[in-house]
Image (cartoon, helix red, strand yellow):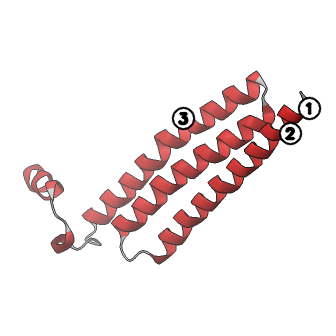
């Protein structure tokens, strides 16, 4: 039984390390990528995945029912709020003219904004 707990703790520590590394890659992407849309992509996908992997590692270490429920809520709210916030940042950047329209493959917002006017 003690060996199983040690293996679980080691796996949890490795997951926390892997998740932190993925989050670090997302931060580097936010600093190095050239435009707002690329940065918003780097702000959502690696951050959400890294956070879920960190939460899985912490869940392996804690093993309590209340702790697992709290971690599940943290993961749920992370997946709900992170992409929505990045979408709003990208949309406000579009509306303020910080996005090059020539680089977009499709521009559905242009049609929506002209219809609203």
Q: Nearer the viewer, residue 46 or 96?
A: 46
- Closest to the camera, between mark 3 and mark 2, is 2
Q: CA distance from mark 1 to mark 3?
A: 32 Å
Q: Which residue matches tag 1?
A: 2
Q: CA distance from mark 1 to mark 2?
A: 6 Å
Tell me if residue 16 comes above or below residue 42 in the rendering. above
- Residue 53 at x, y percent in the picture: 61, 46
Q: Helix or strand or loop: what does disc 1 sit on?
A: helix
The quarter of the picture where residue 21 lies is bottom right
Residue drawn at (70%, 43%) of the image: 57
Q: Helix or strand or loop: what does disc 3 sit on?
A: helix
- Residue 42 at x, y percent in the picture: 45, 62
Instruction: Tell me: 70 left or right of 80.
Output: right
How packed mark 2 is, by other alpha carbons closer than 10 Å (few <14, some 14-19, many 20 or more), is few
- Closest to the camera, between mark 1 and mark 3, is 1
Instruction: Tell me: 99 left or right of 13.
Output: left
How packed mark 3 is, by other alpha carbons closer than 10 Å (few <14, some 14-19, many 20 or more), is few
- Answer with mark 1 or mark 3, whichever residue precedes in sequence: 1
- Determine whether label 1 and label 2 are within 8 Å by CB: yes
Q: Which residue matches tag 3?
A: 76
Q: Which residue matches tag 2?
A: 6
């Amino acid at each position: 039984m003690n060996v199983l707990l040690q293996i679980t703790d080691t796996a949890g520590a490795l997951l926390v390390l892997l998740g932190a590394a993925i989050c670090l890659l997302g931060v580097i992407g936010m600093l190095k990528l050239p435009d707002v849309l690329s940065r918003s992509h780097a702000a959502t996908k690696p951050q959400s995945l890294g956070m879920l992997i960190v939460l899985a590692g912490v869940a392996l270490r804690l093993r309590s029912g209340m702790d697992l429920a709290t971690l599940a809520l943290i993961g749920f709210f992370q997946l709900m709020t992170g992409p929505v916030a990045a979408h709003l940042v990208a949309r406000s950047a579009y509306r303020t003219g910080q996005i090059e329209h020539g680089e977009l493959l499709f521009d559905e917002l242009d049609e929506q904004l002209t219809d609203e006017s």
